[in-house]
Amino acid sequence: MLVRGIRGAISADENTREAILQATNELLREILRVNGIEDFGEIVSAVFTTTPDLTASFPAEAARDLGMSEVPLLCASEIAVPNSLPMCIRVLLHVNTEKKQSEITHVYLKEAVKLRPDMSSAQ
């Protein structure tokens, strides 16, 4: 079995715990759905980043609420690049899979679709 990376991003509506957790939940559910991941045992780890304007909660809390309590989770702050997309949550999931990299669907939702205009997957 191979380890593949699945990328995703979503914008939050505001810097509140509820908005961050809701957006992260929506993003994770969509990534899992479109990639056919039904068993959290397939997820090796997850790295979340938020833009510096999102400080009210850790996105990993939403992953734990979904049931990823045994998955190693890490949160970090995204680099504060001038004129970059604000209020953005990003994730990199590492998964065990038999899929080819070309069969992986990366997910960009809400304002985050602007991050990858070259991708038409799951937007």
Image (cartoon, helix red, strand yellow):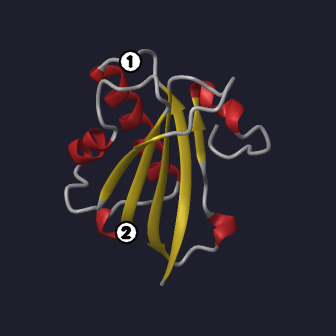
Q: Earlier in the sequence, mark 2 or mark 1?
A: 1
- Crowding around mark 1 (Cα neighbors within 10 Å: few <14, some 14 to 19, many 20+) is some
Q: The residue under label 1 is which amino acid type?
A: Asn
Q: From the image, which quarter does the C terminus lie in?
A: top right
| Mark 1: secondary structure | loop
Q: Position of residue 79 (x, y in %)?
A: 56, 39
Q: How many marks?
A: 2
| Mark 2: secondary structure | strand
The disc label shown at residue 15, or none: 1
Q: Position of residue 13 (x, y in %)?
A: 46, 16
Please name the residue shown 58% across and 44% down the image: 107
Q: The residue under label 2 is which amino acid type?
A: Val
Give the quadrant of residue 111. top right
Residue 103 appears left or right of 89: right
Q: Position of residue 42 (x, y in %)?
A: 37, 69
Q: Position of residue 11 (x, y in %)?
A: 52, 26
Give the quadrant of residue 73. bottom left
Do the CB atoms of the residues marked 2 and 1 lie less than 8 Å apart?
Answer: no
- Crowding around mark 2 (Cα neighbors within 10 Å: few <14, some 14 to 19, many 20+) is some
Q: Going by the picture, which residue comes out furthest to the top? A: 14
Nearest the viewer among 78 and 43 is: 78
Residue 79 appears left or right of 40: right
Residue 58 appears left or right of 32: left
Q: Going by the picture, which residue comes out furthest to the right? A: 118
| 22 lies above or below 66 | above
Please name the residue shown 34% across and 38% down the image: 59
Please name the residue shown 51% across and 57% down the image: 35
Of circles 2 and 1, the one toward us is 1
Nearest the viewer among 28 and 77 is: 77
Nearest the viewer among 73 and 26 is: 73
Q: CA distance from mark 2 to mark 1?
A: 29 Å
Please name the residue that numbered disc 2 is placed on.
Answer: 44
